[in-house]
Image: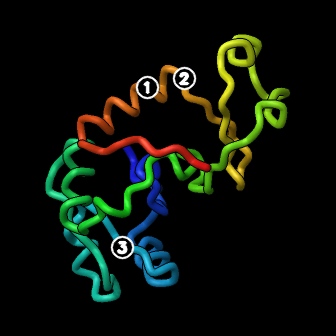
Amino acid sequence: MSGRLLGFDTLYQTNLEDDRIVSIASKEKRIVLTRDIQLLKNSQVTHGYWIRSQKPVEQLKEVIQRLDLSKKIRPFHRCMECNGIIKNVDKAEVLEYLQPKTRAIYESFYRCEHCQRVYWNGSHYQRMVSMLHDLNISPWHPG
């Protein structure tokens, strides 16, 4: 589960060199979350946290608690693909992008303002809501 699912502005790339991570964090005022303790020893990292758990859901719980983020959570507010903001859209606006079965079954749709990816509350959504429930987080819907 990602920070984006919870509505946090998240940059996640596994192929960046440490120097690049430090540069981005400094320039964009980001917190470096890592399992690489050596990265956090870089004097240019002004805000960082060494994640102890190796399990993704536990990592998320750990970061929420450590950074006191529970009141800032806005599930389903950010695009899982590009980090853009998701907004409600009329079905007619996205009809051409939908598969026939999706068109027939669902009425409520959301779209990323940046990459235009379309979302709806299908079975994948239900699995994510279940994960949120396990974290004691209520789902939120973009508006």
Precedes in sequence: disc 3 or disc 2: 3
* CB within 8 Å, label 3 to label 2: no
Q: Please, what is the three-letter code of the amino acid marked with disc 2?
A: Gly
Question: Circle 2 is placed at which residue position?
Answer: 122
Badge 1 crowding class, 10 Å Cα cut-off, few under 14, some 14 to 19, many 20 or more, is few
Residue under label 3, please give it: 31
Task: Assign a secondary structure to mark 1.
Answer: helix
Work out whether residue 23 can be spotted. Answer: yes
* Vertical comparison of 21 with 93: above or below: below
Residue at 24%, 42% in the rendered image = 135
Q: Residue at x 62, y 56 (%)?
A: 84
| SS state under label 2 | loop
Residue type, mark 1 in image = Gln
Whichever of callouts 3 and 1 sits on the residue coming sooner in the sequence is: 3
According to the image, label 1 marks what residue? 126
* Within-10-Å neighbours for mark 2: few <14, some 14–19, many 20+: few
Q: CA distance from mark 3 to mark 2?
A: 33 Å
Tell which of 131 and 37 is nearer to you. 131
Which residue occupies 31% across, 80% down?
47
In the rendered image, which quarter is residue 55 located in?
top left
In this rendering, would 54 be left or right of 126? left
Residue at 54% of width from left, 52% of height from top? 78
Q: Quadrant of residue 85?
A: bottom right
- Please provide percent x and percent y for residue 15: 46, 56
